[in-house]
């Protein structure tokens, strides 16, 4: 087995919309982003061409060592309130995962984090009770590893991109002195992951069984198309402006979101100030605006260049920096997990 030279850093993200790749001048911060590429996940030829551009000196048969991020369908990122008195009980945490999240813990790789700072949860504490359970199904991890290797990518590390992204957004909110809570949405094909972040960390998590596929029948009906497949092709193309239909297409999702937000605002006394939709391809960017308009909040517009430069990440040329938007946030977040703050250095 041949492996490519390791002087550069390579980052790969797999999601339902495609494969995102980046090459950096180093594997950890400080680093310069030298190239971004994106291609459909089911197009082997396009991915091969993208890998050739990302690593032009790669020899035939060589593997690209990369830090890889995943959005597996069965990913778990859920907040829970625990009972400190039961931490030492055998099976207590497994019972929480099973009963509250309907997850079989033996089939998952799991971790428990502090929702305020992302550190490992302290099970030795007698007072800490708010926890963030995160994890991936073992079968999805194996499938992703096999897929990456089959494409010529050797995953030095696999991360749950959702967790990295939440950490990055929380870091940006502190950097930009944004104190109002932020709604973060990962709108996937069959579901939506909803999170509320504030100055205290991840305050709320909720999976919603409403995704883009639920909008396809509405597109068919509203536009009078002959079948759902025609509606699907039009919806995912870049040939029709769906902005005017935004309120109709997001009606069911908005109902669920308003319920979650209403509960949060009653419990905390805080109002959502802005929303950001990560992961979505540019051609579906209108969804973010539609949701923000319906909720009556603003959009979280990230100043990537200034923020990332302060974290030791720069861009090779002005055009490169101009490419970065919410679609790339997950991939950039994988780079940020190598960033060490001054406090951590001490």
Image (cartoon, grey):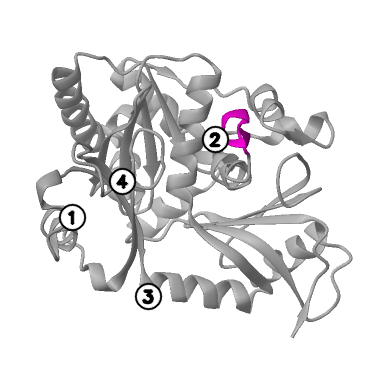
Determine whether label 1 and label 2 are within 8 Å by CB.
no
Does the magenta portion include 338? no
Residue 33: x, y in percent?
76, 42
Dot 2 alpha-carbon crowd within 10 angstroms: few under 14, some 14 to 19, many 20 or more: many
Left or right, 97 with reference to 134: left
Q: Distance between the residues labelled 3 and 1?
A: 18 Å
Q: Distance between the residues labelled 3 and 2?
A: 29 Å
Left or right, 153 with reference to 256: right
Dot 4 alpha-carbon crowd within 10 angstroms: few under 14, some 14 to 19, many 20 or more: some
Q: Residue furthest right?
A: 57
The residue beneath circle 4 is 122
First of labels 1, 2 by sequence position: 1
User: Secondary structure under badge 1?
Assistant: helix
The residue beneath circle 2 is 326
The residue beneath circle 3 is 139
Determine whether label 3 and label 1 are within 8 Å by CB.
no
């Amino acid at each position: 087995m041949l492996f490519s030279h390791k002087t550069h850093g390579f980052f790969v993200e797999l999601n339902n919309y495609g494969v995102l790749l980046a090459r950096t001048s180093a594997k950890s911060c400080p680093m310069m982003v030298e190239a971004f590429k994106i291609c459909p996940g089911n197009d082997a030829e396009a991915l091969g061409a993208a890998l050739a551009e990302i690593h032009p000196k790669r020899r035939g048969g060589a593997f690209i060592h990369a830090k890889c991020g995943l959005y597996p369908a069965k990913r778990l990122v859920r907040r829970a309130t625990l009972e400190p008195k039961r931490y030492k009980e055998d099976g207590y945490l497994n019972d929480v995962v099973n009963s509250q999240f309907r997850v079989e813990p033996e089939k998952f790789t799991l971790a428990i984090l502090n929702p305020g700072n992302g550190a490992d949860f302290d099970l030795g504490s007698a007072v800490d009770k708010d926890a963030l359970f995160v994890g991936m199904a073992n079968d999805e991890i194996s499938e992703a590893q096999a897929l990456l290797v089959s494409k010529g990518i050797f995953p030095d590390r696999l991360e749950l991109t959702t967790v990295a992204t939440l950490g990055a957004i929380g870091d940006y909110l502190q950097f930009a002195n944004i104190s109002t809570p932020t709604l973060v949405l990962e709108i996937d094909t069959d579901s939506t992951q909803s999170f509320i972040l504030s100055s205290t960390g991840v305050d709320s998590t909720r999976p919603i069984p409403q995704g883009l596929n639920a909008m396809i029948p509405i597109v068919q009906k509203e536009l009078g198309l002959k079948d759902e497949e025609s509606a699907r092709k039009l919806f995912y193309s870049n040939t029709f402006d769906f902005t005017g239909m935004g309120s109709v297409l997001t009606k069911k999702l908005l109902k669920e979101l308003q319920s979650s937000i209403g509960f949060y605002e009653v419990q905390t006394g805080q109002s959502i100030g802005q929303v950001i939709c990560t992961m979505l391809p540019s051609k579906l960017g209108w969804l973010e605006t539609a949701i923000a308009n319906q909720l009556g909040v603003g959009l979280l517009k990230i100043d990537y260049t200034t923020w990332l430069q302060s974290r030791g990440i720069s861009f090779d040329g002005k055009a490169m920096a101009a490419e970065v938007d919410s679609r790339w946030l997950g991939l950039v977040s994988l780079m940020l997990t190598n960033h060490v703050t001054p406090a951590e250095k001490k």
